[in-house]
Amino acid sequence: MELMSHLISYNFVSAAMILGIVIMLIENRKERPYGTEHIAIIVVMLSIIVVNTELKEWFFNSVYDPDMDYRGDAATGFVYFRSCIEHILFPMIAYVELLLITPVKKKYILFIPELVLIICEILNLFGPKIIFSYNRHLDFSDGPLFLMPYFVGMIYLLLLLRYSIVFLKEKKMSKGIAVVFIVFLTILECYLEAAYIVVDLMDEIVALDVIIYYFYLVAIYHSETKIKLRTSELELERSRRVVALSQIQPHFMYNSLTSIIYLCDKDTQKAKNALIDFSKYLRKNVDSLSQKGLVSIKDELQHTKVYLSLEKLRFDEDLNVEFDIKDDMFTLPVLTLQPMVENAVKHGINGSESGCGTVRVTTEETDMYHRITITDDGAGFDTEALEELDDSHVGIANVRKRLMDECGGELIINSVPDKGTECIILIPKENHDENTGD
């Protein structure tokens, strides 16, 4: 209790700042902004420094006897070890911050000043007192290299300033005054401590610096996240335009219109219905350019049926279509089903030797997914060559990307040459519920 009382009395500000950093790390644990691990390491080092400082305060206020000869006493080893830890950790914190933004590939080179300091501190601890010493009454005095800890800290702070400016320019962040303030404040504190103008304020200053720097890293992270989100939205919008426009195939339009023209003389009512379907097909593709969010599977099924009705004009009895809809209460990205059915007709059925066959569309609900399966008994292909398919294979890569981006979905294609193709679309229930608010 006495030790805790000393901590509150002498290091309350430092402890409060460290607690504040820990709270920020916890608050951002899901986002995990760049530098989170480094800041966590710094928090550990800061905590060691605060405890180390508190032990000194507690010892000299509660245990220390100014008249006692401490030569050969364990207390002498304690004060020497405590000072070594303090001298080593302050520059180490600046070094860890530097690792966040340095462009140097061989980062171990940057550790050389700290390594030299550690070696000198160990020598000071067990050999000649080149940095500091304590007399028999534990009075502190400087050695010939007493400025070394401050000098090493200065090196890292100046490098931090330099590389921070480069880092911020690369990130296109205009507000770099925070980094300048951090470095200036710490350098000023190093000078004040070295000149004995102030004492034992370094932990508060460093804690404040870490808070400021972490806030700045979080700001950069959120800025980059917004840019990535905007880029993703633009890419998604472009993908929708690509798939919508790719569906308006000149050959398909020519074949459909030719079939309608033929029906005008043979069956005017059927021709009229075909024109209505053709208009619906075009309108759905054009409307998808401005479609926001996910659409109902019922809408996708309806659009697919319109497309198949137009294909039936050309294939007639050569194209058999079957639907087995057991699940129609979920959503998915626009123009997901129809392009896959089109591939089944165009490359599966039409590409087979007989030029005829069956396309079957089924939907079902599993424990984890809403599942759509499109099968055909057409030509099939080698799935190892899937990545090399040309643009005529409508929308495979596009649909796969939009499924992943918009709802975390998955597109699986199984095919055997001359046997047929199975296309499986999986819509995760969890992502579906989040997007629909179910």
Image (tube, rainbow, N blue to C red):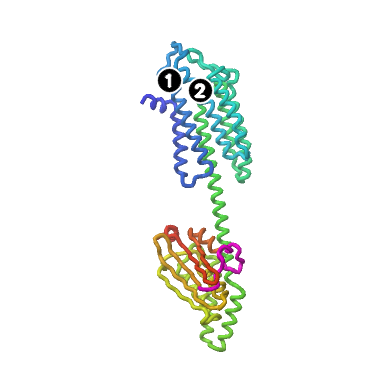
Residue position marked by numbered label 2 in the rendering: 83
Element carrying mark 2: helix
Q: Is residue 368 magenta?
A: no
Q: Is residue 388 magenta?
A: yes
Instruction: Please indicate whether residue 354 sits to the left or right of residue 55 in the image.
Output: right
The magenta stretch is: 377-396
- The x, y position of residue 105, in whole percent, is 62, 40
Residue at image x 53%, y 29%? 90
Frontmost residue, 192 versus 86: 86
- The x, y position of residue 103, in whole percent, is 62, 40
Q: Label 1 is placed on what type of residue?
A: Phe
Instruction: Please indicate whether residue 112 sits to the left or right of residue 63 in the image.
Output: right
Q: Residues within 10 Å of mark 1 (few under 14, many from 20)?
A: some
Dominant secondary structure, magenta: loop
User: Which of the 4 image quadrants contains residue 186?
Assistant: top right
Q: CA distance from mark 1 to mark 2?
A: 13 Å
Residue position marked by numbered label 1 in the rendering: 59
Residue at image x 54%, y 32%? 93
Instruction: Please indicate whether residue 258 sits to the left or right of residue 134 in the image.
Output: right
Residue at image x 59%, y 76%? 253
The N terminus - image quarter: top left
Element carrying mark 1: helix
Q: Is residue 291 visible?
A: yes
- The x, y position of residue 432, in whole percent, is 44, 60
- The x, y position of residue 164, in whole percent, is 60, 39
Frontmost residue, 387 versus 69: 387
Frontmost residue, 124 versus 285: 124
Q: Label 2 is placed on what type of residue?
A: Ser
Against 311, is 291 above or below?
above
The C terminus - image quarter: bottom left
